[in-house]
Amino acid sequence: MRWWKVVGLAAFVGVAATGVAVARAERRRRAYTPEEIRARLRERAASAGEEPEGA
């Protein structure tokens, strides 16, 4: 097998692995209900207001 075939195969495997990772992250993100998202955003906003960075 020539080196360029190995490089092409490695690139193909890399693209496939990236697609799998993106699909998994998308499924995890879509699993939240709108109420859960709002609650998490409110928690983050509250904790960001409590502790200023750089202090």
Image (cartoon, rainbow, N blue to C red):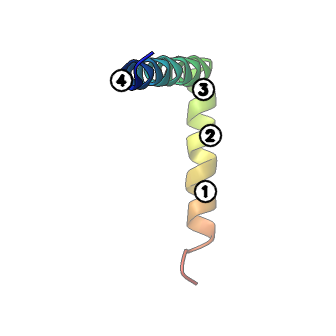
Quarter of the picture containing the N terminus is top left
Q: Nearer the viewer, residue 27 or 19?
A: 19
Q: Are marks 2 and 4 in contact (CB under 8 Å)?
A: no
| Label located before the other in sequence (2 or 4) | 4
| 23 is higher (above) or lower (below) than 48 | above
Q: Nearer the viewer, residue 25 or 9?
A: 9
Q: Separation of disc 2 and disc 1 at Cα?
A: 10 Å
Compared across the picture, whether 31 is left or right of 4 comes to right
- Residue at image position (62%, 40%) is 40
Disc 3 or disc 4, which is closer to the eye? Answer: 4
The three-letter amino acid code for the residue at tag 4 is Trp
Q: Separation of disc 4 and disc 1 at Cα?
A: 53 Å
The three-letter amino acid code for the residue at tag 2 is Arg
Residue 46 figure quarter: bottom right
Whole-percent x and y of residue 21?
55, 24
Disc 2 or disc 3, which is closer to the eye? Answer: 2
Q: Pointer 3: what residue?
A: 35
Quarter of the picture containing the C terminus is bottom right
Q: Separation of disc 2 and disc 4 at Cα?
A: 48 Å
The three-letter amino acid code for the residue at tag 3 is Glu
Q: Residues within 10 Å of mark 3 (few under 14, many from 20)?
A: few
Compared across the picture, whether 17 is left or right of 11 comes to right
Q: Pointer 4: what residue?
A: 4
Q: Pointer 2: what residue?
A: 40
